[in-house]
Amino acid sequence: MSSESSKKRKPKVIRSDGAPAEGKRTRSDTEQEGKYYSEEAEVDLRDPGRDYELYKYTCQELQRLMAEIQDLKSRGGKDAAVEIEDRRIQSCVHFMTLKKLNRLAHIRLKKGRDQTHEAKQKVDAYHLQLQNLLYEVMHLQKEITKCLEFKSKHEEIDLVSLEEFYKEAPPDISKAEVTMGDPHQQTLARLDWELEQRKRLAEKYRECLSNKEKILKEIEVKKEYLSSLQPRLNSIMQASLPVQEYLFMPFDQAHKQYETARHLPPPLYVLFVQATAYGQACDKMLSVAIEGSVDEAKALFKPPEDSQDDESDSDAEEEQTTKRRRPTLGVQLDDKRKEMLKRHPLSVLLDLKCKDDSVLHLTFYYLMNLNIMTVKARVTTATELITPISAGDLLSPDSVLSCLYPGDHGKKTPNPANQYQFDKVGILTLRDYVLDLGHPYLWVQKLGGLHFPKEQPQHTVITDHSLSASHMETTMKLLKTRVQSRLALHKQFASLEHGIVPVTSDCHYLFPAKVVSRLVKWVTIAHEDYTELHFTKDIVEAGLAGDTNLYYMALVERGTAKLQAAVVLNPGYSSIPPIFQLCLNWKGEKTNNNDDNIRAMESEVNVCYKELCGPRPGHQLLTNQLQRLCVLLDVYLETESHDDSVEGPKEFPQEKMCLRLFRGPSRIKPFKYNHPQGFFSHR
Amino acid sequence: MERAAQQAVPLGQMEVFEALQRLHMTVFSQSVSPCGKFLAAGNNYGQIAIFSLSAALSSEAKEESKKPMVTFQAHDGPVYSMVSTDRHLLSAGDGEVKAWLWAEILKKGCKELWRRQPPYRTSLEVPEINALLLVPKENLLILAGGDCQLHAMDLETGTFMWALRGHTDYIHCLALRERSPEVLSGGEDGAVRLWDLRTAKEVQTIEVYKHEECSRPHNGRWIGCLATDSDWMVCGGGPALTLWHLRSSTPTTVFPMRAPQKHVTFYQDLVLTAAGNSCRVDVFTNLGYRAFSLSF
C-alpha cells in the first residue's frame, strides 16, 4: 500500500516541483522514480508516537550535548575543541533530526488538517444531502396530505346508486366484469354513465324548449281566433232567444239573473242563492226574481270623492253667505233619517204558489245602513176574493206574516247596534216606518244569513249560507201553511158573518145531527176592547192576549139565552188554537167566575181542541169549535135542572140523550158527545 | 203581578196549551202527609201534585217553593177525593181507589201500590167516587159516589164488606161521627143520611132543602159538603151553609155566604171553608183571612 501510495505520490510531487519542464520531467520522472525521496510518503510510514519519543530523546541529547559542550567550554582544554567539534556535529545532526521532526510534524499537521477538512467537507455534504432529503420528505409529505385531502369534483356529484347504475347503464359503459372488482374503475364507469345521462337530458331540454316555443305560438294564434269568435256567439245567443222561450228553457233569463245577482248586497245574495237552490231542489212552485235598478247598485260602489268635495265646498259657501239659507234642524234630521233608512236599489222577489193557485208574493229589501233585511208581503188568489168585514186583517200585508215563529212580530229591529244609530237621528223605533220599509222579521234575517247574537252589537255581521239553508225549508212550509190557513179563515169568515157555521162533511161526526143554537153575530173587536171585557181577565192575566193577536166576538143564541164568546185568534192558527171566553146571559149572567159549567164549556172548546182539528191541515178548527159551542149551549140549556120555586114548564125541553145529568163534586153537565152512539156523557 | 212578566216570553204551541190547561184546571182534593210536611193535591185532569208545605210556609219561601215537587198522572179521570193513612195516600176518582206509599211518592215514576174497584151494579158508565172516609178504629175505608151507595172496604184485606143504599141520587160527601160511630153522607138528592157502622143501617135522614131557613131553590137542593164533630154538623151546597144540632136535627146557624161551598172542615172551634173554583188551593190560617195560595 505504501508503495502504491508512494507511486501515486511521486508523480504528484514531481509535477508540483517541476511544473515548467513537464515533458522532460515525465521521462525523468519515471527514471527517477525509484530514487526520489518523498517525505510525505514517509510520514505515513512513521509512527507519531515514536516520533514524539525521538523528539524527546533528541531534545534530551541536545540538552546533554549542550550541557557537555558547556562543560567542555567551561573547562577549556585542547581536546575540548575536537570534542566540541564532535559534539557540535552531533548536535547538528540532532538539529537535523529536530528539523526533520518538525517538518514531519508540520506535514502531519497539514495532513491531519487536510484529512479533517476532507472529512468535514464530506460531512457537510452529507448534512446538506440530509437536509435536502428532509426538505424533500417534508415537501412530499405535504404533497401527500394534499393528495389525500384532494376531493375530486366527481365526489360532489350525486351519482345514481349502484343497483340502478348496473341496471340502467348499457354494458359497454358499466363493464361489469371489470368494475365489480375494482372500485376505481367502478367510479370511472359511473362517472361515464353520469356524463352520458346528462348529455341525453340536455338534449331533451333543448327539444322541450323548442316545443314550448312552438306551442306558445299556437296559443297566440288560437287566442286571436277566439276573440274574434265572441261577437259571433253573442249574435247567435240573441238569435236563440225565441227558441228558448218556445221550449220553456229560459237559460238566458237565468243567466241574466245571475248577472244581476252579482250586484246584490251579501244578505240578499245569500237569500237569492238559497231560495233558488231550494226552489230547484224541493219546490217547483217557488220562483225567484230580482227587481230594481242595477245601475244604481253599481253607482253605490263608486267612491263619492267628487261629491264629497262639492258638499264641503257648498257647506262652506252656505255658512259664509246667509244664515237664513241654512235648512232647519228638522229638515236636516229628516234627511239624516232618510239616509239611515235607505234601501238598497235591488230587491229579491219570491213567489210562493200554493196548491189552490193562490200566490204569496214576498219582496225582500236590504237596509244598507242598518244592515237588516225587511220583507213586504202580498197575497193574490186565483179568483178574486170578496173580503168579509171581519176578515179585514187576515190577509193584510201588515199582519199576514206576523208571528210566523212565536214572538216574531216584526215591529222591532233585530240588530241591537241599530239602537245607537237611531239615537243619533231621533228615531224611536222602526215600528213607525214598517209600513213603508217592510217588516224586519227574524226569519227574514235568518234567510239572509244574518245572525244577530242577542244584546251584543257587532260591528260586522257576516252573512252565513248555512244559517239560511237550515231555515229555508221550515220557513217556506210555514209561509205556505200561513197563507192557506188565512185563506181558509177568509172563506170561513164570509160564511160566519152570514150566521152559518161551515162544517165540512168530514167533521160531521163530531157533532150530533140536530143543533138548535145558532150563530147570530161574528165581528172583529179591537185588542183594547177585548182586554176590557169583564169575563176575559184570566186570559189577559195569563199573558195569552198580546197585541199581535186578532180578536173576535161571536154571539150564539137560542130562545132567550144569549151566549157571548170572545175569541183570541193567534197568528199561529191553526197550530195554536183560538181561545174562547164565554158569558151566558140567561137567568142572570153566568161566566166562568160564577158557574162551573161555563168553565167546563170553555174547557171543552179550549183544552180539548185537538179533537176538533179535523183533517190534516187543521184549518177547520175554528168552525168546529164554534159548532161545538152551539152544541154545548144546547146541552147546557136542556139539562138545566128545573127550579121548583118557579112555575111553568122548562124553556128548553131535554132532547139530548144523557146518561146522567150531574157528576162529580162540581156537578158538571154532560158535555162530551159520543159518536156514533149519539149520547152525551162526562169526561 | 208576577204573571205580567210572562208576556215577554214568546208563546209557542206548548206554552199556550199549558197555560190553557192551567186556566181550566180544578183542584178537587187534597191531603196532608202523615209527617205534616207535604201536601198532595188532585185535579180534574187526573194528576196528583205533591207540594212541600215546609218550604212554602217558611220565611224564605220563593215563587219556586210554591210549585209542586212532583206531578204525576194518577188516574184517567179527575181525582175527586184523597185521604191519607199513616203510611199511604189513597186517591179516588173515576170508579177506582188507588193507594200510594208516602215514602215513595216523591220519587220519579212512582207506581200505585194497589187499586180497587167497588162492585158496581151499572155497567154502562163507571160511576165516580166523590168521597173517601177513613174509619181508623175499624181499619175501614168508606167510598161513596156516583152509584148512590156507600161501600166499605177493609184496608187490611181489600175486600168490600157491605154497601149501604138509600140515597136516590149520587153522593157528594161523607163525614165521620166518631162517638157513635156513625157515617154521615150528603148527596145530590138533598138529604143528609146518618148510618150506623156496626149495624150497617140507616139511622137518620135530614132533608136539608125542606128547611126554609137554609134552602135556596135557585141553587138546587144538593149537599156539597159536610163536617161534623159528633154533636154538631155543618153542611152546605145548594142550600146555604148551615150549622145543625144533630140530636134535634134542627138548623141553628146559617152562614151568610153566597157561593155554594165545596169543602168545609172543623178546626178546633173555627170553621174553615173553601170554594175552590180554580187551579189554586187556598190556605186559610184564620177564618176570613186568606194567607196565600198554592198553585199547580
Image (cartoon, rainbow, N blue to C red):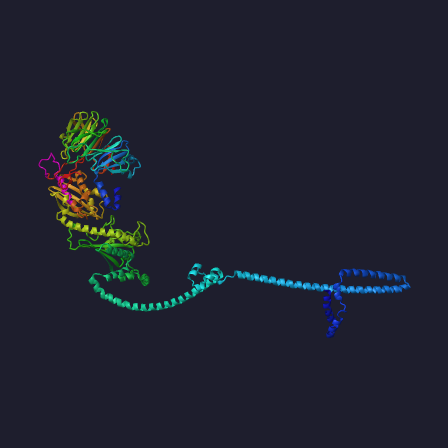
* Residue A647, position as x, y percentages in the image: 9, 35
A635 is within the stretch colored magenta: yes
* Residue B172, position as x, y percentages in the image: 18, 32
Instruction: State the count of labels.
Output: 0
**Residue A353 visible (yes or no):** yes
Residue positioned most to the left? A648
A36 is within the stretch colored magenta: no
* Residue B120, position as x, y percentages in the image: 16, 32
**Residue B227 visible (yes or no):** no
A521, above or below A230, in the image: above
Viewer-proximal residue, B246 or A135? A135
* Residue A66, position as x, y percentages in the image: 85, 62
- The answer to which quarter of the image holds residue B235 is top left
Viewer-proximal residue, A412 or A674? A674
Viewer-proximal residue, B116 or A488? B116
- The answer to which quarter of the image holds residue B72 is top left
Q: Is residue A642 left or right of residue A480?
A: left
Residue positioned most to the right? A78
State the residue at coordinates (23%, 42%). Answer: B18
Quarter of the image where the N terminus of chain B is located: top left
Quarter of the image where the C terminus of chain B is located: top left
Magenta-drawn segment: A626-653
Viewer-proximal residue, A259 or A219? A219
